[in-house]
Amino acid sequence: MEIANDMPNIPRTQIDNSMAKAKPLKLGWSTEETETIAKVLNQLLANYSVHYQKLRNYHWNVKGSDFFDLHERFEQQYNEARINIDEIAERIRVFGKVPLSTMREYLETAEIKETGSDLPSDLMVREVLSDFRVLLESMFDVVDVAVDLGDSGTEEMIKGFIHDIEKHHWMLSAFMAK
Ligand SMILES: [Fe+2]
């Protein structure tokens, strides 16, 4: 029995050429798409990394009657920040991109700015609250891009961070209202 051959007669060289021209995909996303998501994730990574070091600064150098409360609170915050920073950097690696990894890159890229070490404790808390608002804006930017690209993994990860930081913002604001 003869098998019908409905396949068009495309030369092998032509097939190979068309495949060579196709853009490589990473987990189903194009190079442009992974660059877009890596860019906003790196922006968040830079902001978070400067914020992390500020928390360590304030943990070490806070003074005054709130010392025990704030020394402890800043430590809790930087431990959470350390874990989230790692998640963000490794998410960038998932897409085959390179996370910003040096202090110079963080300081050049971040919207969050460093402060000195000799701030009064209430100004340290105000700095942390202000940083939270910048981090949230940076996270909303990541969610917008992730939703546009159908990147559920990044969207879910960042939404968890948003939920936690909004709660920390409430608690530290309440602390300042005493
Ligand atoms: Fe400590």
Image: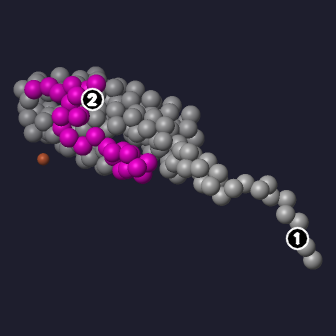
> What's the amino acid at mark 2?
Thr
Decide if residue 157 is in sight here.
yes
Up/down of 86 relative to 172, above or below: below
**Magenta residue span:** 88-116
- The residue at the point 79 percent across, 55 percent down is 8
Q: Is residue 32 left or right of residue 40?
A: right
Q: Nearer the viewer, residue 23 or 69?
A: 23
Q: Does label 1 point to a residue whose CB lies under 8 Å from ligand 1?
A: no
Q: Nearer the viewer, mark 2 or mark 1?
A: 1
- The residue at the point 18 percent across, 34 percent down is 104
| Distance (Cα) linking label 2 and label 1 | 63 Å
- Residue 87 picture location, percent across and down: 36, 49
Mark 1 = which residue? 3
**Splitting the image into 4 quarters, where does residue 81 fall?**
top left
> What's the amino acid at mark 1?
Ile
Up/down of 132 relative to 77, above or below: above
Q: Nearer the viewer, residue 140 or 91?
A: 91
- The residue at the point 10 percent across, 26 percent down is 116
- Residue 159 picture location, percent across and down: 47, 39
For numbered disc 2, what is the local secondary structure? helix
